[in-house]
Amino acid sequence: MRSSLQVVMMSVSVLFLVACASTQKSEKAQYEETRKSFSYVSFQKLSKHTVDPSLELYNKKVKSAEADEVHKELVHSMASVGLALGQYPVFSLAEAELARKAASDDPGKYVAYSAFSLALYSNGWEGLGAEYAAKARLLANGVELDRKYQKSRITAKAILGMVAVSQGDGPAAEALFAELAEESGQEWLPIASHGAAIIIDGPSLQTVEKIETLVSRSDIPFSAKQKLLELQILADTYQGEQGKAKVEVSELITKWSLDALREVGDASTASLVDSVVKLAAKQ
C-alpha cells in the first residue's frame, strides 16, 4: 500500500505537470489570438507591400550587376529585432513570422529563429521564446554564416548581437558586434553593447559595479568609456523605472547598430529596416 506521503507527492507532481501544460497552452492561445488581431494582420500586410517589393527591386538591380543579394529573412529578422527592442511586440512578431517563413536553409533559420525567439519573449511568452532559442542554439553549432550571407554576414551578426543585448548576455553581445565595429570604425560598439546588456539585465545592486569594471578595462578605447558613461547616465535618469530605462537603452543600441551598418555600406538593409520602424511609428 502506498504511504500517505507518496500519494501527496504524486498529487503534487500531477498538479505541477497540469500547471506547466496550462501555462504552455495559455501562451500558445495568446500567440494564436495575437496572430489574428487587427494590429498584427494589418502591419504584416503593410510590411509585405512596403518591404518586399523594395527588396525584390533591389535584388534585381544587384543581380544584374553581379553583386550580392539581400535575403528576405535577414531584412525581416533585422526589422523584428529593432521593433522588439523599440517596444513594439506585436509588430515584432509579425516581422519575425515573415522571417521564419522566408528562411529556407540552416543559416537563414538560425537568424530567423533567433529573431522569432526575441519576438516571443517581448510578448511575454517565455516558454515559446525558450523553445525557439533552443532551436537557434542547435542550428548555431554547425552554421557558417559566410556560406549564405557573405557581405550581409555582419548584418546577421548584428541581429544576433541585438538579441544577446535584449537577453542581458553582455559577453555574447560584445563578441557578435566585434566585426561590425572593426569594419565600421566604431570601435566602442562591442563594449557599449556589453554595457547595454548589463543595464537591461538589471535592476541589480551589481549593475553599477559591472559597468565600472568595464570602464576600468585597459583594453578598451576612450570612446567606449564615453559611451558607457552615456548609458550609465541614461540608466540613472530612470532609476526606479526599469521599464523606461530598458526602452531607452534598447532604442539607443538599435540606433547605434543601424548607424554602424550604414558605415559599412549595408545601407540597403538599414533603409528597409528604417521603413518598417517608421511604419510602426504611424500605427
Image: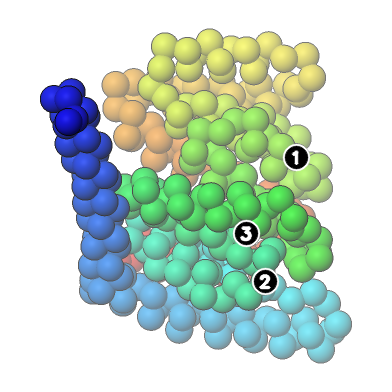
Q: Earlier in the sequence, mark 1 or mark 3?
A: 3
Quadrant of the image occupied by residue 139: bottom right
Residue at the spot of label 2: 105
Q: Earlier in the sequence, mark 2 or mark 3?
A: 2
Give the residue at x 65% y 30%.
171
Q: Earlier in the sequence, mark 2 or mark 1?
A: 2
Horizontal placement of 279 versus 30: left or right? right
In space, the residues marked 1 and 3 are separated at their CA atoms by 19 Å
Q: Amino acid at mark 2?
A: Asp
Give the residue at x 64% y 36%.
172
Tag shown at residue 178 = 1
Quadrant of the image occupied by residue 20: top left
Residue 110 in view here? yes
Horizontal placement of 189 versus 91: left or right? right
Seen as rendered, the residue at the extreme right is 66
Q: Secondary structure at mark 3?
A: helix
Q: Secondary structure at mark 1?
A: helix
